[in-house]
């Protein structure tokens, strides 16, 4: 299942082209040391699966099980990226994203956020974009989709250079 990311003007270039592995375009980019990803989801299984996947590729992870904790961890640790579930107790993912976007601190307000949801309906994706999310990841997800999306948001220039000319015409990922 391809990752349904959409292009928004909030994309950040946090990486450099030196991270690209010229020997093999199918190789994964190595994250900058200390690159943290905050996982905000009330399902422990989602945390375990995503943390294991991300750590195996060199990322550090933080865990929050509700929107309020996610906001607090984002402000304290300023992760490179946030993976945010929609349905959670208390503050939901849309509300937490909106609060982070409206925070007075630009280092927090500009953290890329990917909304995760078991619903792929257009309304979920529309509201994700409307509140300032940088992408949408439908559940269930696969390893390649998660890693492709993370790399596109954190290292867009390196990903663009990694693509072959044939990839440019029929992309399955859309930022």
Image: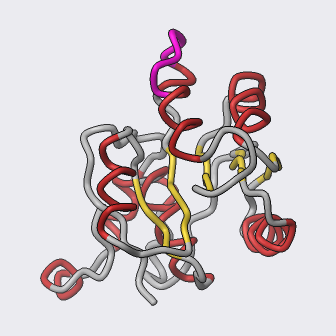
Q: Main secondary structure of the magenta part?
A: loop
Magenta-span inclusion, residue 131: no
Q: Residue 118 appears at what percent x and percent y?
A: 55, 75
Q: Nearer the viewer, residue 15 or 122?
A: 122
Q: Residue at x 33, y 38 (%)?
A: 10
Q: Residue furthest front?
A: 90
> Where are the magenta residues, as a range?
101-106
Numbered disc total: 0
Q: Where is residue 109 in the image (x, y as percent from the top left)?
A: 49, 24
Magenta region includes residue 103: yes
Identified at 46% across, 29% down, the residue is 110
The quadrant of the rendering that contains the C terminus is bottom left
Query: Which image quadrant for residue 136?
Result: bottom left
At 71% from the left and 47% from the top, the residue drawn is 38
Which picture quadrant has residue 54?
bottom right
**Is residue 7 shown left or right of residue 138?**
left
Quadrant containing the N terminus is bottom left
**Coordinates of residue 90 in the picture (x, y in percent):** 73, 40
């Amino acid at each position: 299942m391809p990752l349904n990311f959409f292009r928004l003007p909030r994309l950040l270039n946090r990486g450099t082209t030196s991270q690209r592995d010229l020997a093999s375009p199918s190789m994964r980019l190595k994250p900058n040391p200390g690159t943290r990803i905050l996982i905000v989801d009330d399902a422990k299984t989602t945390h375990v699966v995503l943390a294991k996947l991300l750590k195996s590729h060199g990322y550090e992870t933080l865990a929050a099980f509700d929107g309020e904790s996610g906001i607090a961890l984002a402000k304290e640790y300023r992760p490179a990226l946030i993976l945010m579930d929609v349905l959670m107790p208390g503050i939901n993912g849309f509300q937490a994203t909106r609060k982070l976007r409206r925070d007075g601190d630009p280092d927090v307000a500009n953290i890329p956020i990917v909304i995760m949801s078991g619903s792929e309906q257009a309304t979920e994706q529309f509201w994700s974009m409307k509140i300032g999310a940088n992408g949408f990841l439908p559940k269930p997800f696969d390893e390649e989709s998660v890693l492709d999306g993370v790399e596109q948001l954190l290292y867009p220039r390196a990903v663009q250079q990694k693509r072959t000319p044939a990839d440019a015409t029929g992309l399955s990922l859309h930022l």
